[in-house]
Image: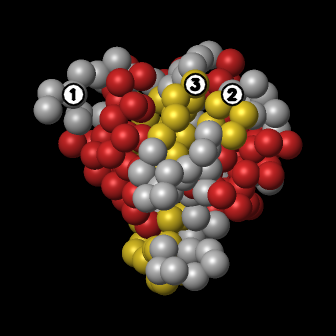
Amino acid sequence: MSDKKILMLVGDFVEDYEAMVPFQCLSMLGYTVHAVCPGKNSGDKVRTAIHDFEGDQTYSEKPGHNFAITYDFDKVVVDDYVGLIIPGGRAPEYIRLNERVLEIVREFSAKHKPIASVCHGQQVLAAAGVLEGKLCTAYPAVKPDVLRAGAAWGEVNETFSNAYVDGNLVTAAAWPGHPEWLRKFVELLGAEIKI
């Protein structure tokens, strides 16, 4: 079933919903999701953080859950996967410092495999240099990174529920965009969703 594998790049304090919901939804659709983290192996865990929008100048943060790593980071071979998910939270700010993470993202991009990134996940895309000329969005605080990386900014609607597709890339601002973001990603994977 190698044609049904999705890679998910996570780290400690990944946003809870942005890791758990795609993992569960894609698993429900029959995909095997390999959640990997630099320096961790299958059976290890990362801590998650729950980010919410409660009227403050930025999101609030609360403790989340322990999220299981399902595959060894050092065993990742991009050709084994049909798509890549990069959740947000605080993990992207430091996993982007790992050169192998950036190589993986560049390889997915070069092979035009679907990439779905949400919230602060676009920090990884910017660091990997794969946003040049792309239309995308992110959590608004990441807008300077996205623009500096050469992307065109896709405006975020007032409910944070919209998503953008540009070629093989699907982006959204935060977890309220999951329905549109995941639907568009699954469409890029070539799966048909009947509603």
Which label was assigned to residue 105? none
* 133 relative to 89 in the view: left or right: right
Question: Are circles 3 and 2 on residues that touch, CB within 8 Å?
Answer: yes
Residue at point 50% right, 65% down?
A: 15
User: On screen, 188 above or below 19?
Assistant: above
Q: Earlier in the sequence, mark 3 or mark 2?
A: 2
Q: Amino acid at mark 1?
A: Ile
Quarter of the image containing the N terminus?
Answer: top left
List the residue tagged with mark 1: 193
Q: How many marks?
A: 3
Name the mark nearer the viewer: 3 or 1. Answer: 3
Which residue is at the far left?
195
Query: Could you say where residue 37 lies in the image, as x and y percent from the top left?
Result: 58, 54
Disc 3 from disc 1: Cα separation: 20 Å
Q: At numbered mark 3, what does the secondary structure look like: helix, strand or loop?
A: strand
Observer able to see residue 87: no
Q: At numbered mark 2, what does the secondary structure look like: helix, strand or loop?
A: loop
Q: Earlier in the sequence, mark 1 or mark 2?
A: 2
